[in-house]
Amino acid sequence: MLVEALLALAAAGGGAIVQAAGTDAWNGVRSGIARVLGRGEEARERGELERLDWTQAALVAANEGEFERIQTAQAAVWQNRLEMLLEELPEVQRQQVAAEIQAVIEQASAGDRGPSVHNDFSGSTFEKSAVQGSGTQHNTFN
């Protein structure tokens, strides 16, 4: 039986997966979760990638009336998969995998911080110019 903290981590992981679907964080979350669940087995990781793709497709295809239900169901599916993985591991590996899951959750959260703008200016001259926008801007002048 898993301790409460690991159950909460699995729930957060399931939520992070469905929240990341369709965002800029998706590819990183997708590969991170597949790697965690695949445990170094290439075929198993490919299977997890297919399951994750199916989850994203189901969320994208959902109409407004069914989106929340599908989102909740998919979060529960992934929570369950993460719980089963954590349950079957010896304690030493369990802590390592928990840290990997936490890193993926943080990656999903980082992709949820809103829009970001990145501007690179090289060899440019600025005179009476303005840059307008919202979000985070990173300007690099070379």
Image: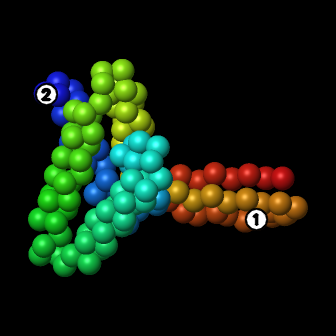
Judge left or right: residue 90 versus residue 103. left
**Which amino acid is tagged 1?**
Lys
Q: Which residue is located at x 14 percent, y 59 percent?
A: 73
Q: Which mark is residue 1?
A: 2
Q: Which mark is residue 25?
A: none
Image coordinates for residue 40, horizontal then vertical, percent: 46, 43
Judge left or right: residue 44 versus residue 78. right
Q: Tell me how far mark 2 sits from mark 1, CA to CA.
A: 66 Å
Depth order, front residue of 89/76: 89
Please rate how many residues cluster around mark 2, counting C-alpha atoms within 10 Å: few if below 14, some from 14 to 19, many from 20: few
Depth order, front residue of 123/78: 78
Image coordinates for residue 75, horizontal then vertical, percent: 21, 54
| Local secondary structure at mark 1 | loop
Q: Which residue is located at x 25 percent, y 33 percent?
A: 88
The answer to which quarter of the image holds residue 127 is: bottom right
Which residue was labeled with disc 1? 128
The answer to which quarter of the image holds residue 131 is: bottom right
| Local secondary structure at mark 2 | loop
Vertical arrangement, residue 112 with respect to residue 93, above or below: below
Residue 134 seen in the current view: yes
Image coordinates for residue 90, horizontal then vertical, percent: 30, 24
Image coordinates for residue 81, horizontal then vertical, percent: 23, 47
Depth order, front residue of 142/51: 51
Chain-order first, disc 2 or disc 1: 2
Q: Which residue is located at x 41 percent, y 36 percent?
A: 100
Judge left or right: residue 128 versus residue 20. right
